[in-house]
Structures are given as structure tokens and as C-alpha cells.
Image (spheres, rainbow, N blue to C red):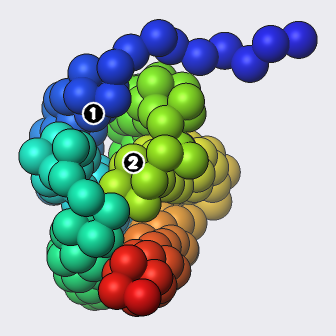
Amino acid sequence: MKKLRFNFSEMNALIITFALNFLIFLVEFYYGYIENSAALLSDSAHNIGDAVILGTSIFVISSSQKVKAKVAIIKCSIWGLFGLLALYQVYISYMSTQIPSYEVIGWIGFLALVVNIISTLILLSFKDSDVNLKSAYICCRNDAFGNLLVIVAGFFVYRLNSWWPDIIAGLIISFIILISAIKLGMESYNVMKAEKN
């Protein structure tokens, strides 16, 4: 069975996935703020970080591997910053003890999952091209995992009538962002070193 892939140029793939990630960031941030949901706000931080990464990827698409690696390191720093902001939001949500709406968490998480599955499939053909496109692919793939966590959090908020599942999901998503930023940053640094030699 053949894998489902979309036939886009690298530039079009990045533009479409950037637009999708920015739009879902706005939706998740709005509802996360209204509901004081750590999971949604952490995931929105993930999405805006991804939008920044995808946006910058558009501008360096025809650059050398060395330039792409340098930009990837900058992108990883930004990604890490959003991871720290997501951690801070988890703390704020924990202190508030407000139980968010499980319906809002579940439906917004599902919408974000659909968006990121589409984005991942669009970028699948380019993930091994270079570190720039690989960073874009990893962003969307990790976001899909984050979206699943948001949906699971919504279910357990409903079952337990507690804000703890939301807090735990937000915490996990924050660490996914930070770990991914560190791993990709190290890979980008190795590409830079290889280009010097």
C-alpha cells in the first residue's frame, strides 16, 4: 500500500503549512485563554513556535546547507523559548485550579490534530532534503503527538472532573518542545561543523 503524499513544491509546502499552523495557533490560544487550559495554551505555544520555524524556512529554502544550519539553530532557540513559556503557563494554570471545559479541549485538540496530520503529510516528501525542511517536518509531527495528548486530557478532565489531566498534558507538551529544540539544535550544529571541514 502506497503512503499518502501530497505533490507540492518545497516553497508551496512551507507556505501552506505555515498558514495552517498560524491559524490553529490563533484558535488554540483564544480557547486556551478563555478556558485557562494548560494543555491548549502549551499546544498553542508549540504551534506559534512551529509557525515561526516554518516562516523562516521559507526564506532560506534556496540557501546553502551552512546558512540553513545556522538559521535552524536560531529557530531551535526560539522553539526552546516557547517551550519555557509553555512551562510557565502550566504553572499559572496549576495555581488557578480552574477546571477547563473538557468539550472545548477535546474539540479544539481534534481540530489541531487534523491540521497537523495534513501538515505532516505535506512535508513528508521533503523531510530528508536538508536540516531546514527536516525541522519543519519534525515541528508538525511533534504537534500531532501534542494534539493527541490534548484530546486525551479532555477525556480525563471529563472522567475525573479535575484540572490535573490538563496540567499533566501541558507539562508533557512543554517538555516535547524543549527536547525537540535541543535535539534539532545539536543536529544543526553538527551540519555546520561538517560544512566547515
Location of residue 51 with respect to 83 vertically, above or below: above
Instruction: Give residue 48's mark.
Output: none
Residue located 28% across and 71% down the image: 66
Dot 2 lies on which element? helix
Q: Residues within 10 Å of mark 2 (few under 14, many from 20)?
A: many
Q: Amino acid at mark 1?
A: Leu
Residue located 55% across and 30% down the image: 125
The front one of 85 and 40 is 85
Q: Position of residue 108 (x, y in %)?
A: 37, 34
Q: Kindly give the residue lying farthest to the right in the view shown.
A: 1
The front one of 61 and 91 is 61
Reading the image, the residue beneath label 2 is: 133
Dot 1 lies on which element? helix
Q: Position of residue 175 (x, y in %)?
A: 48, 80
Residue 83 is at least partly visible in this image: no
Location of residue 84 with respect to 165 vertically, above or below: below
Q: Are marks 1 and 2 in contact (CB under 8 Å)?
A: yes
User: Which circle's residue, 1 or 2, is located before the other in the chain?
Assistant: 1
Q: Amino acid at mark 2?
A: Leu
The quadrant the C terminus occupies is: bottom left
Instruction: Give residue 14's mark.
Output: 1
Residue located 33% across and 62% down the image: 65
Residue located 49% across and 36% down the image: 126
The quadrant the N terminus occupies is: top right
Q: Position of residue 14 (x, y in %)?
A: 27, 33
Q: Residues within 10 Å of mark 1 (few under 14, many from 20)?
A: many
Q: Position of residue 167 (x, y in %)?
A: 45, 73
